[in-house]
Every structure is written in C-alpha cells, then in structure tokens.
Amino acid sequence: MAYTITTDPARIDAVAIHAMLRETYWSSRIRREVVEEALRNSLVALAIDDQAGAIVGLARAVTDYATFAWLCDVFVAEPHRGRGLSKRLLHALESHPRLRTLRRWCLATRDAHGLYAQFGYQPVDAQRWMEKRMPPEAWQEPEGVRT
C-alpha cells in the first residue's frame, strides 16, 4: 500500500479524526468540538491511504513553534499498523521547518515507550514535572453518549 504523509492543514478531516481518536484509550469519550479546537491549534501530521484517500493515522504537536512541543494523539488505524507509519508521522513533525529551534519535546504514553525511544525520548525526572488534571466533564461526553 502507498501512503502520503502530510502536514497540510487543508487535508485535516476533523470528523474522521474524531472517530479515530474515539478508538483510543486516551480519548474514548472526547467531544468532537474539543478535537476540532485541538486540531486548529496544533501542527498535525496525517497518514493518508493513497488508494482510498482516507486518513489512517495522525500525530499532533501542540507547540509555540519556538521552544517547546508536546507530542500527542499518535495513532494508526489497526489495518495499517506495522508499516512504519508512526515513525513517518513522527519524522514529519520533528523535521518540520517551523520546529527547528525547539529546545524540548515532551509526551506521555502508556504503551509505546519503545517507539519513542527510537526518536531519542527518555523518561523524565518526575520530581521536576507537575501536572493538573481537569475534571472529565470539561472534555468528555457523558457516559453512554456517542457523537
């Protein structure tokens, strides 16, 4: 199969991406308007199946385009896994001309440490990092609701 990897915002299909993210452990109940806003405010790399013309993978960088990026929403649809698409998506973001001056990339993962280690990511000093978690109702659909 042939795939196109692109960061062209005109290729973003928020409805398709929302459906993909609803299949992940980290965004299974995310509201579509939250996804739409996130896509507008991020640099997005897409993997597109050339034959079907469908988005089959994505990776997103939340960034100030100068010093910092948070890598998130790295996902490839099940039938397209094992073809190096995650690596191609990460490379598209990390080599993007607007991100050449970044001092730090960060991410959080439950199960893909091996993938990210190939790109130089290392565990962080937990004593230096802090987080604030917002209540689920700020971004999730109520239980049982699917959009």
Image: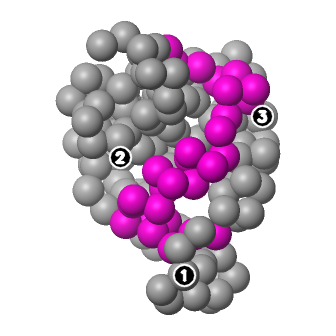
Q: Position of residue 101 (x, y in %)?
A: 71, 26
| Mark 1 vs mark 2: in front | 1
* Residue picked out by circle 2: 122
Looking at the rendered structure, the kind of residue marked 1 is Val
Give the distance between the C-alpha atoms of the residues marked 1 and 3, in whole angstroms: 39 Å
Dot placed on the residue nearer the N-terminal end, 2 or 3? 3
Q: Position of residue 67 (x, y in %)?
A: 72, 39
Nearer to me, 117 or 111: 111
Write down the residue under mark 3: 66
**Element type where label 1 sits in the image:** loop
Count of picture labels: 3
Label 1 sits on residue: 145
Which mark is first along the chain, 3 or 1? 3
Q: Residue at x 77, y 56 (%)?
A: 37
Which span is picked out in magenta?
4-31
Does residue 85 lie above or below 134 as drawn? above
- Residues tagged 1 and 3 counted as in contact (Cβ below 8 A): no
Q: Residue at x 31, y 62 (%)?
A: 110
> How many other residues sit within 10 Å of disc 3, few (<14), some (14-19) or many (≥20)?
few
**Residue farthest toward the top in the current orientation of the protein:** 2
Using residue 141 as the reference point, say whether residue 37 is left or right of it: right
Q: Is residue 23 magenta?
A: yes
Q: Is residue 145 left or right of residue 84?
A: right
Q: Is residue 31 above or below residue 7?
A: below
